[in-house]
Amino acid sequence: MRKFMVVLDDSRECLNAMRFAAMRAAHTGGGVTVLSVIPPEEFNHWIGVGEIMREEARERIEVHFEVYAKWMRDKQNVDPELVIREGEAVKEIMAQVSDDPEIGVLVLGAGTDNKGPGPLVTALSRQAGSLPIPITIVPGDLSKERLQAIT
């Protein structure tokens, strides 16, 4: 089964990327992998404190994921999987693509402010020619109706 991989973070554009991935998966019989990457700098503390912070980060991610997962299950009949990795986002995205041969498309949301599309879109676009899968960049301000029409 071909999977659409989408990155879960705290950005506003993440919502449209999630919607797009779920709708495409529903229309094509695919799956959705939701990847969340915990940056390493969050744990540069004493060992005990770092472990507590790591566990809290994982709990926050799981709660955030469940909101999207419930919508995907209820509205799109897609049961997403959550993958949590630790490290630098671009490296971990590439590692996940390499580790899971069923991932066929990376879906990213583009920011809507004047700072540009966002750090992930910028970094991965530069590598697009050498990536093993295509990237779909979803505009952050696309309406639900337009997303439905596109997918």
Image: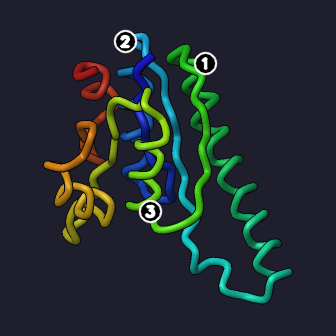
**Among numbered discs 2 and 3, the one appearing first in the sequence:** 2
Mark 1: secondary structure: helix
Is any part of residue 116 visible from this angle? yes
Q: For the N terminus, give its image quadrant.
A: top left
> Is 67 situated above or below 11?
above
Picture mark count: 3
**Location of mark 2 (residue):** 27
Q: Mark 3 is on which residue type?
A: Ala
Q: Which mark is residue 84?
A: none
Res 112 seen here: no
Amino acid type assigned to the residue bearing label 1 in the image: Asp
Q: Is residue 54 left or right of residue 94?
A: right
Label drawn at residue 74? 1
Quarter holding the C terminus is: top left
Most foreground residue, 113 or 34: 34
Q: CA distance from mark 2 to mark 3?
A: 28 Å
Whether pointer 2 and pointer 1 mark residues with C-beta atoms closer than 8 Å, the reply is: no
Q: Which residue is depicted at the point 50% across and 17% down? A: 76
Compared to residue 43, the image places residue 62 above or below, namely: above
Q: Nearer the viewer, residue 60 or 41?
A: 41
Badge 1: how crowded within 10 Å, few (<14), some, or many (20+)? few
Which of the 4 image quadrants contains residue 112? bottom left
Q: Tell me the element at label 3.
A: helix
Q: Quadrant of residue 3?
A: top left
Front-most of residues 128 and 81:
128
* Nearest to viewer (mark 3 / mark 1): 3
